[in-house]
Amino acid sequence: MTTPSQAYRNAANSPAGRHAAEAAKEARDSVKSAAHSAKETAEEVGESIGDQVSEFASDVSRKAGEYASDVSRRAGKQYGRARDAASEAYDEVHDRAVDNPHVTLALAVGLGFLLGAFLVGRR
């Protein structure tokens, strides 16, 4: 009777065992080669996608900068208009107050009374 180790040794040394070992080595080499080529392809695709993403990001950044610049310019114009309107209104009120001091005093007293009544009424 043969022992399990003798059976294994005989099977490994047989021509079929040698052929199976060579086939396994070839399969291993084929898998390594396929994995290597897949890795290279993935790197090329990754670089292409990276370039596209980079180009898209720079385009978005440029457009956002242009939009921010446009909004800033428009806000500056509106601020200037509002400042001019407030200055003109102040000058107009000041001129009217200088021309009619008694009316100005009466308006101030009336507004003070209304404000006081409103604040006391809220308590």
Image (tube, rainbow, N blue to C red):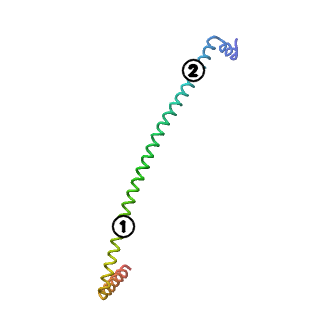
Tell me if residue 65 comes above or below residue 87 in the rendering. above
Residue 37: percent from the left, percent from the top?
A: 53, 27
Q: Is residue 11 left or right of residue 61?
A: right
Q: Quadrant of residue 121 in the image?
A: bottom left
- Secondary structure at badge 1 equals helix
For the residue pair 112 and 101, the one nearer the viewer reads as: 101
Q: Which residue is mark 1?
A: 80
Q: Quadrant of residue 9?
A: top right
Question: Which is nearer the eye, 52 or 15?
Answer: 52
Q: Earlier in the sequence, mark 2 or mark 1?
A: 2
Q: Position of residue 89 (x, y in %)?
A: 32, 75
Number of the label disc, if any, that sits on residue 59:
none
User: Label 1 amino acid?
Assistant: Gly
- Name the residue: 32% across, 79% down: 93
Q: Is residue 79 above or below residue 54?
A: below
106 vs 71, nearest the viewer = 71
Name the foreground residue: 47 vs 107. 47
- Residue 90 shown left or right of residue 27 in the figure: left
Where is residue 41 drawn, in percent x and y? Answer: 50, 30
Is the C terminus in the top left, top right, bottom left or bottom right quadrant? Answer: bottom left
Give the residue drawn at x 36%, y 70%: 83
Q: Which mark is residue 27?
A: 2
The amino acid at mark 2 is Ala
Q: Residue at x 29, y 86 (%)?
A: 100
Residue 81 higher or lower than 91, as above or below: above
Vertical side of 96 occupied by 54: above or below:
above
Spatial separation of the CA atoms under disc 2 and disc 1: 78 Å
Q: Is residue 21 left or right of residue 64?
A: right
